[in-house]
Image: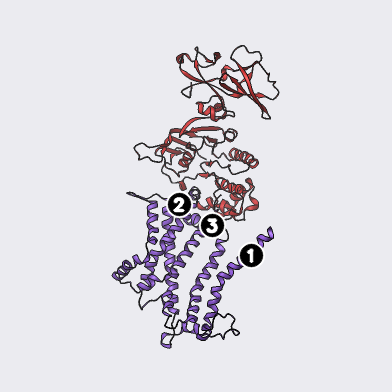
Chain colours: A purple, B red
Amino acid sequence: MGKLYKFLKYSFITIWTVFVVAPFLWALTTSFKDFNSVNGGATYIPWVDFEPKLEGWKVLIKSPANGGVDIIEPYFNSLFVTCTASLISIVLGTLSAYALSRFTFKAGFVKNNDITFFFISQRIMPPIVLSIPFFLFLGAIDLLDSLIGLIVVYIVLLMPIAVWIMVDFFNKVPREIDETALIDGCNPYQAFFKVVLPNSIPGLIVAGMFCIIFGWIDFFFAFILTFTEVQLLPVKIVALNSSITPWWSLSASALVSVAPLIVVAFIVERYLSKGNLSGAIK
Amino acid sequence: MSKIDLNNISHSYNPNDPNPIYALNPFSMTWENGKRYAILGPSGCGKTTMLNIVSGLVRPSAGNILFDDKDVTDLKTENRNIAQVFQFPVIYNTMTVYENLAFPLKCRDFLKDKIDERVKSVADILNLQSFLNSPARKLTADQKQLISLGRGLVREDVAAVLMDEPLTVIDPDLKFRLRRKLKEINEEFKTTLVYVTHDQNEAMTFADNIIVMSEGEVVQAGTPKELFERPNTTFVGYFIGSPAMNLFETEASSNDSVKINNTIIKTNTNLSNLKDKKIKLGIRSEFIKIAKNQRENLLDVDVEKVEDLGNYKLLTAKMGNLTIKSKINRETEIPSSDVKLYIPAEKCCVYKEEKLI
């Protein structure tokens, strides 16, 4: 019984791993192919099946004047916008979430839950609904086609995620923790920073991860709100496309663009697997 | 280490409502310096609210609190120098055991040497020495609760240590030792200890004074003996003691006696104003004896069952539709028929509208 279970378990894991890794393998090999190798059907082993070429990768760093598509600048733009917007969203989101979780607000019929819902409701609307208001708004304050403008928009999109995750997380951190800190002699700010926040690192990491992912992969707003001055990576990758689909450079760019997320996933995984997420108390 | 006065304290969680519901009805009380108090009552009777008012987590809707005659009603929790231990262990997960214990002192800017000395001595008392450098979250639930307790005891000058059912998660053997330890700490350092519990045994063995609460009301405050022998209300009689106090619905038949199923039972209470009024007679099962040569205050009963509970036998008897419980010595033989139970007059409590006369 035990053996069978083990066998099934590892079989499943193996199949799943193949399922997950295969596209990467495909992208990796394709990125080293040229037109002829791609058209020759599925091949995987370099030097045997096909002759590896660096053309797909070179295109990414060549300037447009030399027939390439320079993705280095958009890459750093994307990193900058995503990280800044995520950081601000996490800071603001965590503070608002703590307030929403611990204090009672009342403005007429609007109470804590309504405020929380207000944050989440920003994500319920289809993005297309927001595009025109954002366009007009950024136009009015002269921030269209700028990094700052994008950061502002991304904060609007990412902060609800942070608030939503952190409210839930703080609600699960018993009030007694805060109260104990007060009794032990902290003022409410110290209680938050010294006791509650360190206990909430897993929540912060999850919220941060979601913010980074959603910020990094956004194409829609980056496409609509920028033109020539500032470009983000997803928009630039699309620009790679041409009448003959350049599978090799598309594959290469896909790998580069997914790389930061993989790094984030590996860092985050260590924290998540520690089991800190639950059982902070009791 | 302060005397704590609660003056006309009351609390409602919806004070602005036209009909506020009171979690705590107005009461006044003084907690003497260095004594042990137990607050006893069923869940939801306002025990925790009372503690939270003392520690400042809840501001009372009315009344004021004095620590050593100084009004602290508006003083914030962090400035009250009070310790509170909750029902479930609250530990600072990200810190080591040592840091957990040192935290209350650190927050108050104690010197490093002093902190070290206090933490070590508290760790000694609670047998936590060997864990001082382990991360607190790695410990078991009862060790975690010891940490919570330790954080309460680490300040010597604390006004009082408030404990909200602190030993619920701790296993019985350790519970017993800890209770003794707390008593020792109290005797040695004269720390005022306030202990909330719903376990009457815990309260009776631990405290100098017990405060019994029910539905937001302080029903009776007194020594364990007073509560046991002269419960103020039928609730206290019912709640304290195991089995609960025997209570018989009856009416006064003369100036000092009542009638139970046509049997006259004398009491030491003056009942002259209560003729034909509905009253209740209460008597502890501990005081009911099998009659030997007594002539009066006897009840003719049928034995329903006898349970051997180790150090005593619990006799359940029927008299008509009344059930009477009596704790009998192990050695006492219980006759199989014609059993008479003796009700000592001086131990009878008479209640009118559930209150002691």
Q: Inspect the image, locate mark 3, and give the three-letter code of the amino acid beneath it.
A: Leu
Q: Position of residue A133 (x, y in %)?
A: 31, 66
Q: Nearer the viewer, mark 3 or mark 1?
A: 1
Which residue lies under the disc numbered 2? A187
Measure the alpha-carbon separation of dots 2 and 1: 52 Å
Residue B346, horizontal then vertical, whole percent: 57, 18
Camera-nearest residue between A7 and A97 = A7
Among numbered discs 3 and 2, the one appearing first in the sequence? 2
Q: Is residue B159 left or right of residue B325?
A: left
Q: Nearer the viewer's eye, disc 3 or disc 2?
A: 3
The residue nearer to you, when weighing A203 against B146, is: A203
SS class, disc 1: helix
- Residue B270 x %, y %: 49, 15
Is residue A183 or residue B350 the one in the foreground? B350
Q: Are marks 3 and 1 on the same chain?
A: yes
Q: Of the residues shown, which amino acid type is indicated by label 1?
A: Tyr
Q: Residues within 10 Å of mark 1 (few under 14, many from 20)?
A: few
User: Quick one: label 2 or label 1, which is nearer the N terminus?
Assistant: 1
Q: Nearer the viewer, residue A242 or A158?
A: A242
Determine the secondary structure under disc 2: loop
x, y percentage for residue A54? 52, 85
Give the chain letter at badge 1.
A
Query: What's the residue type where badge 2 is placed?
Result: Asn
